[in-house]
């Protein structure tokens, strides 16, 4: 079960940080505030999900530097940057690094909430997709070598007879392997099987018999 998403607000301006925290809490969103990027980075290894809102201009570690470090850590979490008037160049740089949105001060409360909800929805979709891919790979790992070969043939759009010829086995044997892998993959139809295979990124290279 995925933990509840948390919005991490990073701003050295106490008034802005507290204001954002109050706004998000009022909207029913869990929030944690940090007065510096350094303080946030100390707990970065323990973060699993959520969204980051960070000011661009902060002492020691800027919002841009923070964004780079988050990306370098491998944590796939959406980041929204807050910029002052006339800092569009910094906002563009942040977007190039990977920020999902930027907001200029003073920003509209509804606009910020919409941006946060959009970021959280995308993050939830990403987490769901990762879980789905992991589940498919677990099922693939349970297939025998022959079942995997038959699966690759099916994904390549080959008929049972063609797969049988490629593998040097009878069409009836292919049907048995096909039924077995459908059960192991929990696939209700061929289209369902193909969808899972594509989601997992299975290559559709020609089958080599005797492999």
Image (cartoon, rainbow, N blue to C red):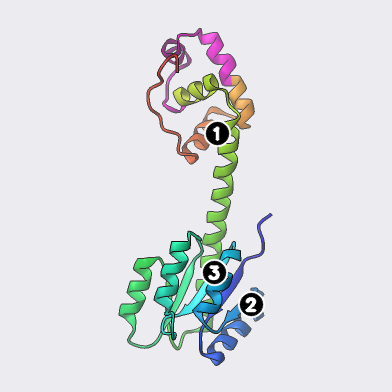
Q: Tell me how far mark 3 sits from mark 2, CA to CA.
A: 15 Å
> Which is more foreground, mark 3 or mark 1?
3
**Residue 27, label in figure:** 2
Q: In this view, does 98 lie above or below 185?
A: below
Residue occupying image coordinates x 60% and y 31%: 185
Residue occupying image coordinates x 54% and y 22%: 147
Helix, strand or loop at label 2? It is loop
> Is residue 99 at least partly visible in the picture?
no
Nearest to the observer: residue 151 or residue 142: 142
Q: Badge 2 local density, few (<14 within 10 Å), some, or many (20+)?
A: few
Residue highlighted by disc 3: 51
Nearest to the observer: residue 105 or residue 205: 205
Q: Where is residue 59 in the image (x, y as percent from the top left)?
A: 44, 86
Q: Of callouts 3 and 1, which one flags the residue occurring earlier in the amino acid sequence?
A: 3
Magenta stretch contains residue 63: no
> In the picture, which quadrant includes the C terminus?
top left
Q: Of callouts 1 and 2, which one flags the residue occurring earlier in the amino acid sequence?
A: 2
**Residue 138, label in figure:** none
> Which residues fall within the magenta stretch?
155-178
Q: Position of residue 84 (x, y in %)?
A: 39, 87
Residue highlighted by disc 1: 192
Magenta stretch contains residue 169: yes
Helix, strand or loop at label 1? It is helix
Q: Which residue lies furthest to the bottom in this view?
A: 15
Q: Is residue 44 above or below residue 132?
A: below
Residue occupying image coordinates x 62% and y 66%: 5
């Amino acid at each position: 079960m995925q933990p509840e998403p948390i919005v991490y607000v990073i701003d050295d301006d106490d008034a802005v940080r507290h204001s954002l925290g109050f706004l998000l809490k009022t909207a029913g969103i869990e929030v944690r505030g940090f007065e510096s990027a350094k303080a946030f980075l100390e707990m970065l290894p323990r973060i699993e999900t959520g969204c980051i809102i960070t000011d661009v201009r902060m002492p020691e570690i800027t919002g841009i530097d923070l964004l780079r470090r988050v990306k370098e850590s491998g944590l796939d979490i959406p980041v929204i940057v807050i910029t002052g008037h006339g800092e569009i160049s910094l906002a563009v740089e942040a977007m190039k690094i990977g920020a999902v949105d930027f907001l200029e001060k003073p920003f509209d409360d509804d606009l910020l909430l919409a941006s946060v909800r959009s970021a959280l929805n995308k993050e939830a979709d990403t987490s769901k997709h990762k879980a789905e891919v992991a589940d498919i790979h677990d099922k693939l790992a349970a297939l025998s070598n022959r079942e995997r070969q038959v699966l690759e043939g099916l994904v390549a759009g080959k008929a049972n007879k063609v797969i049988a010829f490629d593998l040097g086995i009878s069409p009836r044997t292919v049907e048995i392997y096909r039924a077995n892998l459908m059960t192991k993959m929990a696939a209700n139809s061929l289209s369902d099987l193909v969808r899972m295979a594509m989601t997992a990124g299975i290559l559709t290279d020609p089958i080599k018999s005797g492999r």
